[in-house]
Image (tube, rainbow, N blue to C red):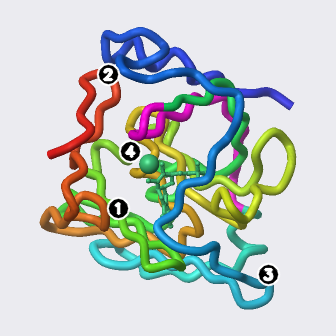
Amino acid sequence: MSVRDVTGLHEEFEGERLPPGQRETSRFPVLSKGGTPSWSPETWTFEVWGAVDEQVTFSLEEFRDLPSETQRQDFHCVTGWSRFDNEFTGVTFPTLAELVGVRDDACHVMFHGFDDYTTDLSLDDCMREEVLFTWALDGEPLPDDHGGPVRVVTPHRYAYKGAKWVSGVEFLTEKELGYWERRGYSDSANPWNEERYS
Ligand SMILES: Nc1nc2c(c(=O)[nH]1)N[C@H]1C(S)=C(S)[C@@H](COP(=O)(O)O)O[C@H]1N2
Ligand SMILES: [Mo]
């Protein structure tokens, strides 16, 4: 299986592979605002709503049947650790957006998690091939603590922009702030500019 390597994207941000103030770790710490929500494959759903042509609900089977790919990505946590070379499999944001049809007046996106987590990104920051809805890490089902069955990863931004246990995506016509963004974390979250706090 071919793997798309996006570990070079730091060049676009004119930075080193390891962003300033980060240290590399081979561990994969778990950071959640609360506990890990339980789920079952029969009742899990993923919804897309807001400024889209068609509001869609996917079952887990339908979601995993979407066109997918595997990417090699780095992961940068705002608390100061980075984990290199994670292989995530899933559907890219642009693929999903194409499928549901994003309306012209959409400019922003809110990701929702089953733990009531939210995080926001501009539509431009989402329409990138490396923004993935992923269900597998290194060829294994994504562990529950890391957001299984499906989470978002955003290797061009600090990892709080990637909603674990993602339950849906809302397309917005005006910017709104997510859970950590309302509590003082940077909305832009560019690791190469150390945009950690607002
Ligand atoms: N649903 C949900 N997603 C979340 C969080 C959370 O608490 N709930 N924490 C965020 C934060 S602050 C980080 S650093 C990463 C951590 O991902 P990890 O636990 O897989 O390392 O998930 C992000 N996504
Ligand atoms: Mo974080």
Q: Regarding mark 4 in the picture, which secondary structure is present there?
A: loop
Q: Position of residue 76 (x, y in %)?
A: 48, 34
Residue 140: where, in percent of width, then height? Answer: 86, 49
Residue picked out by circle 4:
127
Q: CA distance from mark 1 to mark 3?
A: 24 Å
| Viewer-side residue, 129 vs 115 | 115
Q: Earlier in the sequence, mark 2 or mark 1?
A: 1
According to the picture, the residue beneath numbered tag 3 turns out to be 41
Q: Secondary structure at mark 2?
A: helix
The single residue placed furthest to the bottom in the displayed view is 43
Q: Amino acid at mark 4?
A: Met
Q: Earlier in the sequence, mark 4 or mark 3?
A: 3
Within-10-Å neighbours for mark 4: few <14, some 14–19, many 20+: some
Q: Nearer the viewer, mark 1 or mark 4?
A: 1
CA–CA distance between discs 2 and 3? Answer: 38 Å
Q: Residues within 10 Å of mark 2 (few under 14, many from 20)?
A: many
Q: Which mark is residue 192?
A: 2
Q: What residue is pinned by disc 1?
A: 119
- Specify start and end residues of the magenta stretch as a single range: 66-80
For the residue marked with disc 2, what is the amino acid? Trp
* Residue 128 rendering spot, x and y as whole percentages: 43, 38
Residue nearest the observer in this picture, 173 or 180: 180
Horizontally, is 183 left or right of 95 in the view?
left
Task: Look at the numbered disc 1 and say if its residue's Cβ is closer than 8 Å to ligand 1.
Answer: yes
Indicate which disc, 1 or 3, sits on the residue closer to the N terminus: 3
Labelled pair 2, 3 in contact (Cβ < 8 Å): no
Spatial CA span between label 2 and label 1: 20 Å
**Vertical relation: 5 (above or below) 109:** above
